[in-house]
Image (tube, coloured by chain):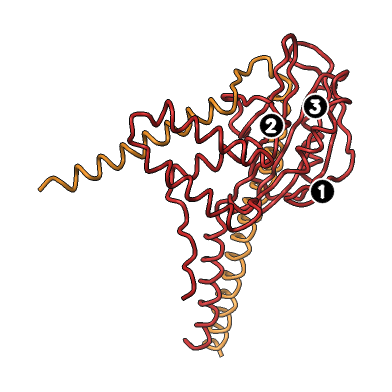
Chain colours: A red, B orange
Amino acid sequence: MFNKVLPFLAALFILIAINSLQAHEYAFFSPPKEWLIAKQTSSPSVKVCFLQKEKRGFSPSINLATEPTTVSLNEYAAAVRQIHEEDGKSRWRKLGTVQTKAGEALLTQIDCTSDQNESMRLLQLLLIHNGKAYILTAGALKEQAAELYPQFLSSFRSFTITSDLLSPLPDEASRQKLLLQIEKLKDSLSLPSFEKKILPAFQKKFSQEHADLGGYWQLLVLQEMIKSPPPSPPAKAS
Amino acid sequence: MTRYFCTKMFSLLTLFCFFFASSVGHARESIDDHAKNTDALYRTGAGAKDGAYTATSTSMIAWSALIILGIVLVVAAAHQSLAKTTSSSSSTDVQ
C-alpha cells in the first residue's frame, strides 16, 4: 500500500515546492516619461500612482491596484461595472482587449466626475492572474484625454508580471553588471557619505541605464535588492 | 426471526443515520460555500473602485520626484538592515 501512495506523495510534494517558489510575483509597468510618483495614497489596494504635475488644476495620473479574487475576468468586469454605475452618474463601457507583457487584458472606459466636479475620463485595464486582479487606472480630464491616450496605452502594454525582477534585462551580462553594482552599493551602506553622495549618484546612473524599464521597476529593484541579498551568480562550468 | 429483524433494522438505522449526518454536513458545507462565494462577489471590484477613486482625487495626493522617493525608501531600508546586522553581531559578542 505504501508503494502505491508514495508516487502520489512525491507528486504532491513537488507541486507544493513549485508553488512556494512561484509564491511572490512582481507586477509593474512603465509610466509616461517624467511623471512624478505619489508619496502615498489613501487606498490600501493601490500599490503605486504616477501623475503629470500640472501648474493649475487637475493632474492626469496612472495607478496600479490589486486585489485577491476567485472570479473570472468577465465576472470581475461585471462587478466593476456595477460598482461604477452605482451612483447613476458614471458611464462604463468595454473598449476591447489589450495585449500586455503579462497577457491579454480587458480595457474599459469610465466617464465620471472628479472630486472637484470636473468631467473626467478614466481608462481602466483589468487582468486576472493567479488568483489576483490587477487594475491599471489612467485618468485625465475629458478634454485632455484624447492627447494622453497614446501614453496611457503605451503604459498599459508595458504591464508585466514576473517572479524574477531581473528577467526584463536583455542578457546575462547586464544582469551580472546590475548585481555587482548593487553589491558595491550594499558594501558602502555604513559609509558616512552613503546618503548624500553614493546613493544619489548610484540612483541617477541606475535610472539612466534602465530608463526603458520605467521608474516603478527601478524602485522595486532597489527596494528588493537592499532588503535581501542578491541571488548568487551561476557557477562557471570547469 | 425477531433477532434477524432487529439486526436488519439496526443496520438500516445505522445506514440512515450515516446518510442523514453526511447530507446535513454537506448542506452546511453548501450554505457556508454559498455565503463565502456571495461575500466574495459582493467585495469583488474593490481594487478597481480604489483605483478609480485615486485617479479622480489626484488634487489630494502629495507627489515627489522619483529619484527623491527612491533615495528615501532605500535609506530607510538600509538603516533597517544595518540595525539588524548591529544587533545580531552585538548579541553574538555577549558571553
CA gap, disc 2 and disc 1? 18 Å
Tell which of A148 and A172 is nearer to you.
A172
Q: Mark 1 points at which residue?
A: A99
Looking at the picture, how far across and down is residue A145, in whole percent?
85, 24
**Image position of A141 with respect to A109: above or below:** above
Q: Name the residue under label 2.
A: A63
Tell which of B38 and A231 is nearer to you.
A231
Q: Are marks 3 and 2 on the same chain?
A: yes
Lateral position of residue A35 relative to residue A203, left or right:
right
**Image position of A220 with respect to B23: above or below:** above
The residue at the far left in this view is B95
Image quarter of residue A60:
top right
CA gap, disc 3 and disc 2? 22 Å
Looking at the picture, how far across and down is residue A142, in whole percent?
86, 20
CA gap, disc 3 and disc 1? 29 Å
Three-letter amino acid code of the residue under disc 3? Glu
* Chain letter, disc 3 residue: A
Image quarter of residue A209:
top right
Tell which of A123 and A32 is nearer to you.
A32
Three-letter amino acid code of the residue under disc 2? Asn
Three-letter amino acid code of the residue under disc 1? Gln
Q: Residue B94 carries which label?
A: none
Give the mark nearest the N terminus, 3 or 2: 2
Of labels 3 and 2, the one closer to you: 2
The residue at the far top in this view is A56
At 37% from the left and 39% from the top, the residue drawn is A188
At 77% from the left and 36% from the top, the residue drawn is A80
SS at mark 3?
loop
Q: Give neighbour class at mark 1: few <14, some 14-19, many 20+ (Cα, 10 Å).
A: some
Looking at the picture, how far across and down is residue A196, in whole percent?
42, 25
